[in-house]
Image: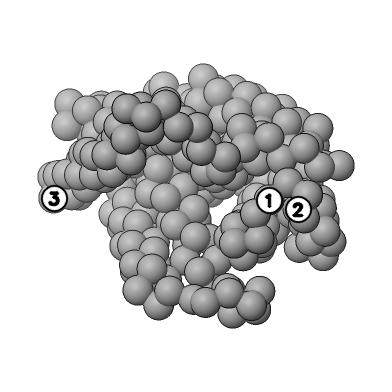
């Protein structure tokens, strides 16, 4: 699916290797977060590092094993790059000025440009052969639109009080920036492409579903890990994020399984 594959593979491997190093350091030397992070946010950060380790290992494996005709593998690769971009975007925007901060910037930048370079190298001739049933198109577009409007509503409702008072929060503001500036517009664009029967929408949809799965799962895992950090867990919160992440996983699997990428 992606042209100039050898160049792309080198970039993918670099992003995977750097993110694996950063995440391993975070998990095995949690003191790197002590001066830059509130204690109640540590479980979520460590859980994100755990998920990043798994994502980086899968990215390394797929980057080595994929070839020109492995369309679905390449879509999963782009999904993992999107997760890494978002995850380290949080670290960069939240100004986590520890000894790894320059590495965070490098990963954030590399994963972003890796995505851009991969997307502009998608073989347009192959796109013409992508097919999916109407029910899958409708399900994908409907859920993408629902997700976008849900999180626009949630984040806007949280931002309006801050805008009225001028309060500046110290943590988690990166979520608003990344979601409202990058992710949610991408979701709406993808939904529009699916509705207009543009085959590129069928490529973007599983990428976004996968990104949502990995991120939400890491949030749910973070809530589950709270007792290990002498914090009180919130079972309802854990269940909500895990169930929602599983829903996105099902949508991703359905998108890859039922979409025909004819070579």
Tell which tag, 1 or 3, sits nearer the viewer.
1
For residue 135, which numbered disc appears in the image?
A: 3
Provide residue 109's location: percent of width, then percent of height: 67, 27
Q: Which residue is mark 1?
A: 37
Which residue corresponds to the image point at 49% horizontal and 60% vertical from the top-left? 219
- Determine the residue positioned at 79% across, 61% down: 30
Q: How many C-alpha atoms fall within 10 Å of the one at disc 1: few (<14), some, or many (≥20)? A: some
Q: Are marks 1 and 2 in contact (CB under 8 Å)?
A: yes
Of the 4 image quadrants, the one containing the C terminus is top left
Task: State the residue position of label 2.
Answer: 33
Query: Residue shown at 50%/26% (left/top)?
Result: 119
Q: Nearer the viewer, residue 48 or 83?
A: 48
Q: Between marks 1 and 3, how big is the CA–CA gap?
A: 45 Å
- The residue that appears at 45% across and 32% down in the rendered structure is 167
Q: Is residue 254 left or right of residue 88?
A: left
Q: Quadrant of residue 187?
A: top left
């Amino acid at each position: 699916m992606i042209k100039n594959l050898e160049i792309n593979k080198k970039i993918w491997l670099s992003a995977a290797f750097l993110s694996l190093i950063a995440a391993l350091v975070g998990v095995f030397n949690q003191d790197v977060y002590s001066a830059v992070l509130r204690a109640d946010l540590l479980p979520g950060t460590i859980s994100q590092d755990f998920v990043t380790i798994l994502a980086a290992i899968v990215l390394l494996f797929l980057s080595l094993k994929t070839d020109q005709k492995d369309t679905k593998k390449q879509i999963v690769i782009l999904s993992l790059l999107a997760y890494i971009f978002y995850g380290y975007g949080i670290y960069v925007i939240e100004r986590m000025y520890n000894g790894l901060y320059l590495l965070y910037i490098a990963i954030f930048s590399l994963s972003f440009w890796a995505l851009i370079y991969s997307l502009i190298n998608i073989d347009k001739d192959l796109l013409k052969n992508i097919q999916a049933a109407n029910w899958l198109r409708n399900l994908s577009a409907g859920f993408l639109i629902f997700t976008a409007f849900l999180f626009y509503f949630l984040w806007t409702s949280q931002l309006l009080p801050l805008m009225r008072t001028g309060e500046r929060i110290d943590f988690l503001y990166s979520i608003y920036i990344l979601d409202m500036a990058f992710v949610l517009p991408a979701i709406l664009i993808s939904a529009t492409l699916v509705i207009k029967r543009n085959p590129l929408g069928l490529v973007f949809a599983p990428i976004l579903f996968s990104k949502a799965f990995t991120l939400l799962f890491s949030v749910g895992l973070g809530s589950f890990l709270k007792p290990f950090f002498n914090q009180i867990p919130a079972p309802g919160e854990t269940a909500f994020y895990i169930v929602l992440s599983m829903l996105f996983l099902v949508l991703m699997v359905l998108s890859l399984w039922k979409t025909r990428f004819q070579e």
